[in-house]
Image: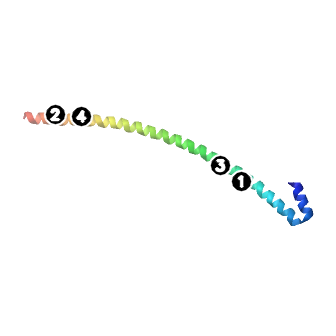
Amino acid sequence: MEQLIAVGLKESVYLGLSLFLIFWILKENQKREKEMREDINKREEDYKKLLAETNQMITKNQEIIKELTEKLEVVNAIKNDVQEIKININSKK
């Protein structure tokens, strides 16, 4: 790279500066791409953690819903029993 710039400078200052600028831009783009890649990887890791936490919450919520459904069935059974008892009491009167 440095040899190319030196040859360019012998030909013309503008050619040497142009070559320097091209190589500098390429180097900076490599740095930026590396940083972006690292940022993407970090975001992917964060996303996976968040997804795992969300799945745990969903599982827990499903368990709670199941428990509440079972309790509601018990309450409905009690309600039906009370209604039958009322009907039996009223029919005996």
Q: CA distance from mark 4 to mark 3?
A: 58 Å
Q: Residue at x 70, y 52 (%)?
A: 33
Q: Is residue 46 above or below residue 73?
A: below
Which numbered disc, 4 or 1, marks the residue closer to the eye?
Answer: 1
Q: Which residue is mark 1?
A: 32
Q: Are marks 4 and 1 in contact (CB under 8 Å)?
A: no
Cα–Cα span, label 4 and label 1: 68 Å
What residue sits 75% from the left and 55% below the top? 28
Residue 44 as seen in the image, left or right of residue 79: right
Quadrant in the picture for the N terminus = bottom right
Q: Which residue is mark 4?
A: 78
Where does the image place residue 40, in percent across and percent down from the top left?
63, 48
Q: Which residue is mark 2?
A: 85
Pick the residue in front: 40 or 82: 40
Q: Which amino acid is tagged 4?
A: Ile
Q: Amino acid at mark 3?
A: Asp
Q: Position of residue 75 (x, y in %)?
A: 27, 36
Nearer the N terminus, badge 3 or badge 2? Answer: 3
**Which residue appears farthest toward the right when viewing the image?**
10
Q: Secondary structure at mark 2?
A: helix
Percent x, y for residue 60? 44, 37
> Which residue appears at 67% of the width and 47% of the height?
38
Q: Amino acid at mark 2?
A: Ile
Q: Which residue is mark 3?
A: 39
Between marks 2 and 1, how big is the CA–CA gap? Answer: 78 Å
Q: Which residue is painted at 48% across and 38% down in the image?
A: 56
Assign a secondary structure to mark 4.
Answer: helix
* Disc nearest the viewer among 3 and 2: 3
Label 4 to label 2: alpha-carbon separation: 10 Å
Q: Quadrant of residue 24?
A: bottom right
Query: Disc 1 marks which amino acid?
Result: Arg
